[in-house]
Image (cartoon, helix red, strand yellow):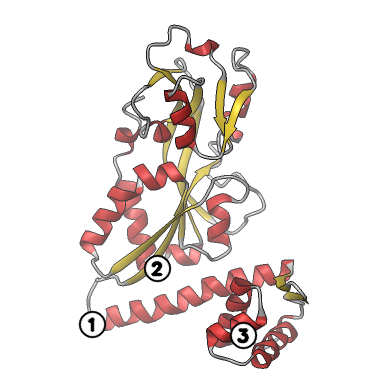
Amino acid sequence: MTDLAPHELRILVAVDRDRSFTAAATALGMSQSAVSHAVRGCERKLGAVLFERGRHGARPTPAGAQAVAHARQILHLLATLATETRAAAQQTAELTGPLRIVAFRSAAAHLLPGVLARLTARHPGLAPELRIVREIGRGTAGEVADGHAELGIATLDAATGQTPSPALPGLLAGRLFTEPYALAHPVGHPLPRTLPLVDWDENCGSYTRDWWRSQDWIPAATVNVEDDTVTLSLVAQGLGMSIMPALTLLGAPPGVAVTALGPQPPTRTVGYVTTPALARTAAVRELIRELRSAPAPALVASV
């Protein structure tokens, strides 16, 4: 097999992004026939069909999705190679360029601002790009595995410290902190456990499910929403109670009270996810260092 060249990797990424050979050709300043020829060449080299062609455009096959994920990661490493080599030649530790991060909403709102402020204060040339991804399905770890980000803030399996999904091998995960869940309810309600349950899609993962099933006072959700901030707003308006992790409760609006769930509440482990290759790059190493130095106890002190 002949290795793919960087320009071929860029073509694969463009076709996957635009879901069209024609649109990818326009974005790359190439002809449609040249893009099609390059993709066929990649398929011959890899021995697999990478895209399904049809009237609805180009859709990656399972093999194509895997190839594109590797292509994104390799292109980022090539860009990092050039940046870090120049820095070494100039004998400077200054980091420059983009650093793509994905995180679930509460981590993006309450954990990362301070981390990124310290990181960019030391490296003004670094340009973090933060995107919020819902922590369901493949979640933030899937975005890293697919090459869309260099690092993700993810919920980890409490026992193993790895991502809960076994379908995402080859990732490197590290624990940051474990946070308790607590009961969020309207201020002043005398019996908050008797209220209807307001829940959101990202809540109650594998780390809380066993505890949840053992609690006979928790009813089925009366209202289910997609966003934890909406859940808190509904609780503040007296529409029910919710069981939420500490990081989310840092954003609780006026009108929401927080009560502990007992001496052994359910917990959630929060950590970072990257790849072994990306973990060796200077920007990701510095980001992990800042994440590890973040004052985790302060994140849960209000619960």
The residue sitting at the top extreme is 190
Q: Residue 4 has which mark?
A: 3
Determine the CA span between mark 1 and mark 2.
17 Å
Query: Which amino acid type corresponds to the residue marked 1 in the rendered image?
Result: Gln
Whether residue 6 can be seen here? no
Percent across and percent down for residue 257 are: 38, 20
* Most foreground residue, 252 or 151: 252
Query: Which amino acid type corresponds to the residue marked 3 in the rendered image?
Result: Leu
Q: Tag 2, which secondary structure?
A: loop
Q: Residue 90 has which mark?
A: 1
In the rendered view, would you say 208 is above or below 87? above
Q: Which residue is mark 2?
A: 281
Whether residue 201 can be seen here? yes
Percent across and percent down for residue 256 are: 39, 23
Q: Quadrant of the N terminus?
A: bottom right
Which class describes the residues within 10 Å of circle 2: few (<14), some (14-19), or many (20+)?
some
Q: Nearer the viewer, mark 1 or mark 3?
A: 3
Q: Tag 3, which secondary structure?
A: loop
